[in-house]
Amino acid sequence: MNPMNLPADSLVNYIFPNNAEVAWSIMIVIYPYITGLVAGAFVVSSMYHVFKVKEFKPIANFALIASFCFGLFAGLPLLVHLGQPQRAWEIYVTPHTTSAMSVFGYVYSGYLVLLMVEIWIIYRKYFIEMANKTGGLWKLVWTVLALGVTEYHPESEKYDRKFASFLAGLGIPWACILHGYVGFVFGSVKAVAWWATALQPFIFLSSAIVSGMAMLFLMYAFIMWRRRQDYDYVMVKKYAISLWIAFLLDYALEVLELVFVSYERGLHWALIKPLLSGPLWESYALGQMGFLSIAPILVLGVVSLLDVRGKALVYFTSLASLMLVLQVLVMRFNVVVGGQLISKSGRGFVDYEFEFFTKEGVLTAMIIFAMPFVAYYIISRFLPIFERKSLQLRPDE
Amino acid sequence: MIKTTPKSHLFRLAGVLVLFAVAFLLVKSWATPDSWNFEQWYRGDALIDIAAQPLTYGGNESCKDCHQAAIKKLRKFDHKALSCESCHGPVVDHVKGQKKIAKAIVDKSRWQCENCHDERINRPKGFPQFSQAGEIGKSIKKHKDLEAETPCLKCHDAHDPTP
């Protein structure tokens, strides 16, 4: 029976609607964050594989493997957030275009398959080498990985290279869809004033590229330092310039979003202005849009425009990367949690408190976030990610 | 040993991918419920399953046959739209068939009132609200002297809460 047709004196079982809690927890903050790292790292790898930026050759495979490692765990925060995670796979069984989330399942899995195939085609030669070098169980593992083709034909290199370029080319729009889509999920929630903007997919995508590039650089700087290997300063310089441009674009979009809502002076602004000047003042105004944006723009600007070289180049770029990694993390927090702080009644703000030891607390987030790095470490034990020899490519040599 | 060509690995990769795709489609079609309604996008049998679930709460409709007088009286009060079973427990514990099997409970605990009356930003300004941090009486002055644990029902009638 339609409740609207009930006579006026009918009995209803009324209970007051509550929105006392921020239902999308810190898990939903790190979900787009990790997804962003996948997309960002992939873009770096494609710079070499598709756009033939030769300076990025030494890190192209590293970027690809890192992207894959992040990809493995991008969906995990969502599973932790769900009350019935065993039902998550049902989005694959009965997908529908009216559910953005169900489409994500396919986009995300398809992307992981693409990454796996690309890594496979690039490392196939190594699999064959190992299958012929090892014996016993390991030989079997490497042979299976090489799909039983244990002979490397010199002519196949051409096909492999073409196929890898094709996959990398296909991967760029796919990475954009993957992360632009995450922005779409938020941007299409019209009930939350702070999310509902058509710019959201672009902001998510550009910040994804920034965070992926910045995280990759921190990993690169750390790994080279651990291996006592020389930094590839030519690459670092180009990387810093690319990161600077990517972030300028991202920051422009973020400012644009703010300017739009502010200039329109609509209903949304009436809710967003007190949000940004109230509960989000520190994390948004001072953090995301203030220090964590302006400082890296300046540092990377100095690195890009002036003749900074040698160790200083690495130190400055690492510092800027660290700030950018934090900027995007804070941005995800400001979007996900910040948007939910606005009461659905529009009468004010609800409170958010950080939890540490709960199921969806900060500790869980830290454990999930550490997993891609552990996966990377394990993979790096088996695959040669960086060239073994020391790279001596100083600009002044 | 099978002789391989420069393209063998690509064919094998295609084979593996096709195999996975077919396996996925098979699992998908197997896992899609038989009664799945592709027009309306829900599992048709879900309605039957839900209807077959044992009744716990009957809603206020289930009270009115026996408690007509109480319900008629209740209609004049502010709490007329509330669910009886919220405080009196589910109907299944009280009635079986058409027979009363046990006395309905009367839950006088404070949280029952707080479900609607603790202070929340999303509640209308004129709605009586009391904050949880022991600041009873923030909205209504005469509650100032009360302690945080004082049951509301000490003074108020749950059916007719008018002060």
Image: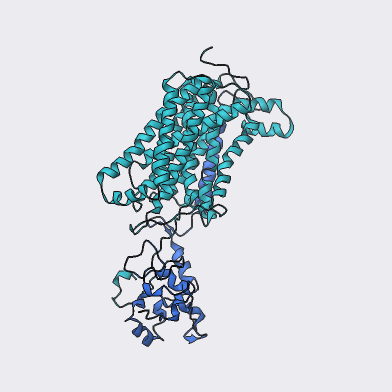
Chain colours: A cyan, B blue
Q: Tell me if residue B84 comes above or below residue B127 in the rendering.
A: below
Residue, x 25% and y 47% (percent of image)? Answer: A265
> B95 or A232: nearer the eye?
A232
Is residue A56 visible to the viewer in this orientation of the structure? no
Quadrant location, the N terminus of chain A:
bottom left
> A201 or A6: nearer the eye?
A201
Is residue A383 visible to the viewer in this orientation of the structure? yes
> B26 or A27: nearer the eye?
A27
**Picture coordinates of residue A253, whole percent (x, y):** 35, 36
Question: Which residue is at the far front?
Answer: B145
Residue A356 lies left or right of residue A378; in this view the side is left
> A264 or B37: nearer the eye?
A264
Residue, x 69% and y 25% (percent of image)? Answer: A132
Residue, x 70% and y 25% (percent of image)? Answer: A133
Number of numbered discs overlaid on the protein picture: 0
- Res A145 → quadrant: top right
Q: Tell me if residue A266 comes above or below residue B10 in the rendering.
A: below
Quadrant location, the C terminus of chain A:
top right
Q: Tell me if residue A396 comes above or below residue A29 in the rendering.
A: above
Q: Tell me if residue A44 comes above or below residue A69 in the rendering.
A: above
Question: Which residue is at the far right?
Answer: A136
**Picture coordinates of residue B112, whole percent (x, y):** 45, 73
**Picture coordinates of residue A356, whole percent (x, y):** 55, 52
Residue A185 lies left or right of residue A79; in this view the side is left
**Picture coordinates of residue A205, whole percent (x, y):** 41, 37
